Image (cartoon, grey):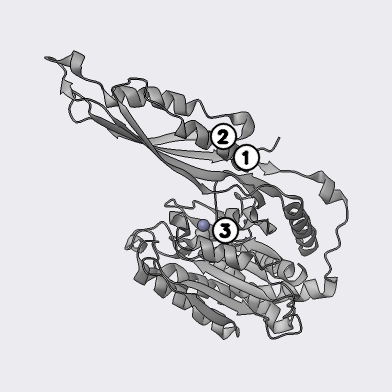
Amino acid sequence: MIAYEGIVLRHKEHMKQEIKSRIDNQSLQVIANSARRGESGMLDLLRRLVEQESPSNDKASVDRCMQIAALACQALDGSVKWHRQRHFANLLEARFGFGSQTRTLKPVLLLGHLDTVWPLGCLQSMPCRQAGGRIYGPGVLDMKAGVAMALSALAILREHNFFARPVILLLNSDEEVGSPVSRSTTESIAARCEAVFVLEPAQGLGGAYKTSRKGVGSYMVRVNGVAAHAGIDFASGHSAVVELAHQIARISAITDPARGITVNPGVCAGGTQSNVVAAEAWAEVDFRFIKASDAKKIERKFLQMRPIDKKCGLVVSGGVNRPPMERTRRGIELFAKAATLAGELGFELHEAATGGGSDGNFTSAIGIPTLDGMGAVGEGAHANHESVLIEHLVPRTALLAAMIATV
Ligand SMILES: [Zn+2]
């Protein structure tokens, strides 16, 4: 049974077996030293990324943030390709190490996003600032620090020519709204890659890497009833609100904690006045699941919903948005390698599962080994106290570089 919702998994078995990391100790020391030297440059880039606000729905702002990252890529001899978008910011694809003798090998994909959930102007109430060993600011943890770490890791690899295979960095602009336009690009690039490293934040303050994520979907349930005066003509009314209440009870019963299935009618509304039998009501429902096979069963239950009051109409729309990132053998092997390298770099790395989705769900679902949570350690993603712990930035960057150098 896999524990979910942020509970760290402990797999003593691959801590015991010695996994060779294919990088000698001297090279690892070189990476660790370079990461330390690169800290101020990384912090400077992070501050510039955070100070350029980038809400998903504001193309011009996210495009400006992408430009900052593009210049940083070009400074490292990365070749930049734009995937142009009409409504969202352009997606940035940058390629590194393709000129070397490794060009014929499958690349590794570093996957991130530069959009945030924060509206324009929020820097005024939550400016980018450093205090108590942390950096605060909108999007600092989710995931501008992860992007700054990736560029710092690429600088290390370039400096010492440690590219074991080519690297593609893909930065999306619509992740926080479900990746509607970037999904196909992410999948087609990932399909040609050896492995995907996702720059999302690590799990909790313990900083675990994520080897599995739940799948995510949503439904809109709309009920049409028959309006009537609640005092004069109650009997001829058919309440959409009452019908929706019954349906919500049924929907909620799909939740199955043992299988990791949750169904949350998170928003609902209906009716106009308390003295009117409601003609309309609706609910927005989020659902999550561990196994792709469970998604079919959940979808069938929603699509088979019928009104209990036959005079009411019921319209259900929606479905799966992100397939689950299932815990695979190759994903566990990648984690095991990371845990070994972390040990050699002097810190302990744990593995976690989470109920939250990322673009890693897409790459994992098409069968590419995916390791997630390789970005910053911190807390408060999507909350006012969003922050990253500075002390973890350098060691995690060294680990990311070592993983790219050995995968
Ligand atoms: Zn994110």
Disc 3 CB within 8 Å of nearest ligand 1 atom: yes
Give me the residue at 88% from left, 52% from top: 17
Query: Is residue 131 in view?
Result: no
Residue for badge 3: 200
Residue 297 disc label: 2
Between 407 and 25, the one nearer to me in the picture: 407
Left or right of 196 on screen, residue 144: left
Which one is closest to the eye, mark 1 or mark 3? Answer: 1
Left or right of 32 on screen, residue 144: left
Q: Secondary structure at mark 2?
A: helix
Left or right of 341 on screen, residue 195: left
Q: x%, y% of residue 345?
A: 76, 64
Residue 293 disc label: 1
Amino acid, disc 1: Ser
Q: x%, y% of residue 78?
A: 59, 82
Q: Earlier in the sequence, mark 1 or mark 3?
A: 3
Q: Earlier in the sequence, mark 2 or mark 3?
A: 3
Amino acid, disc 3: Glu
State how far apart marks 2 and 1 are (Cα). Answer: 7 Å
Rendered image quadrant of residue 313: top left
Q: x%, y% of residue 281?
A: 29, 32
Residue 291's place in the image compared with 139, above or below, is: above
Q: Secondary structure at mark 1?
A: helix
Task: Please identify the residue farthest to the left as the structure is shown.
Answer: 232
Asked whether the beta carbons under mark 1 and mark 3 sit within 8 Å of each other, the answer is no
Give me the residue at 63% from left, 29% from top: 258
Asked whether the beta carbons under mark 2 and mark 1 sit within 8 Å of each other, the answer is yes
Query: Is residue 367 in view?
Result: yes
| Picture quarter with the N terminus | top right
